[in-house]
Image (spheres, helix red, strand yellow):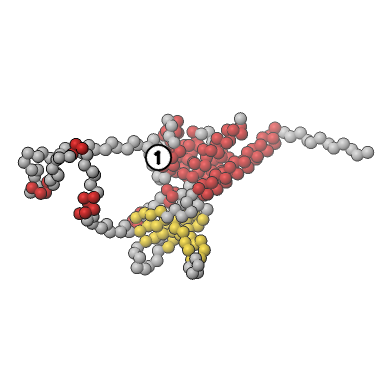
Amino acid sequence: MNASPRPPAPVSQDEFIRQQMLLQTSALTRIASALEALVIAQAPREPNYRRPLGEFAAFDWSSIGATVAVRDEFGPTTLDSLGYLWSRRSPNNKYGEAIWFSRPIGKDADGHTRYLCLIKFELPSEAEPVPDKVQRAAQPPATPRDWGRSAPQSVGSTGGAPRPGHPPPPPAPASAPAAPRPIVKGERDSNKVSAALKAGAALDDVAYAVNGVNGPTLFWGAARHWFAPVALTDAAQKQNPGNWAAAILALRPAVDEWNKVRV
């Protein structure tokens, strides 16, 4: 006669908590990986950013979602972005001074290697003068209030002074300054970060501030405000090494998912 199977041994409370934490950590890791894959899938295949050549030396690579993988005495030689490695190029040819980062994607019908460009630093081209005909065409159309009025005379046409009986027009009103961001770039006080989030600062405000000089402060200020557990903060940093803006953007939905699991 076969013996009946033994019941499973009881699990201690500590072991049960440890198993639940492992399950939740595994789920959060999958969530973080899915978020990273979603960011890469939604990103343009060829960003092809353009910046002045003078910005290269002190450029903030996190502002375009890139991290420096390798560097030499002249600066980064390889960037990690969108799941790919982009190599620095700066040939000495007739096309002018420029530095860019690109990666090969195969060959065309003629056997030439094709490249995608992440970002290019170049000297701005010299502006061309605008012809008189184009200037006249670019003037705004006259409104009914202006009909019948003579064309305004420039100050220079009368030797630097307005025509008699024609006072100079009043200066145009100054445009209202743009509303300040609730979190300034590179904010170094994590309490101010938390206070701004409580006051309704959006994730794009946080990402804007992260692109300053103190990303870690903003990351931990946001983590404290959202009561993010250590497992989530570790996963966000591991999935986005050195990219604090991406880490914060990944942390928010992960915290939401964590709260759903806890409930």
- State the SS at label 1: loop
Which residue is drawn at the image coordinates 45% and 30% (left, top)? Answer: 198
Q: Residues within 10 Å of mark 1 (few under 14, many from 20)?
A: many
Please give left or right for residue 25 compared with residue 220 in the image.
Answer: right
Q: Is residue 191 visible?
A: no
Q: In screen coordinates, is 49 left or right of 256?
A: left
Q: Position of residue 47 (x, y in %)?
A: 44, 53
Give the image location of residue 196, x and y in percent.
Answer: 42, 33
Give amino acid for label 1: Glu
Residue 89 visible at all: yes
The answer to whether 50 appears left or right of 177 in the picture is right
Please tell me which residue is depicted at 52% across the width and 42% down the height of the picture.
250
Q: Name the residue under label 1.
A: 187
Identify the residue shown where x is 25% and y is 58%.
128
Which residue is at a point 17% across and 39% down the rendered structure image? 147
Q: Nearer the viewer, residue 47 or 224?
A: 47
Residue 55 in the image: x percent, y percent?
35, 54
- Residue placed most toward the observer, 71 or 29: 29
Q: Quadrant of the N terminus?
A: top right
The number of numbered discs placed on residues in the rendered structure image is 1
Above or below for 160 versus 179: below
Give the quarter of the image for residue 168: top left
Which quarter of the rendering shows the C terminus? top right
Q: Give residue 50's quadrant in the image.
A: bottom left
Of residue 70 and residue 260, the one placed in the foreground of this image is 260
Q: Where is residue 226 in the image (x, y as percent from the top left)?
A: 51, 34
- In this rendering, would 94 be left or right of 11? left
Furthest-left residue in view?
Answer: 164
Please, which residue is most extreme toward the right here? 1
Quarter of image, res 92: bottom left
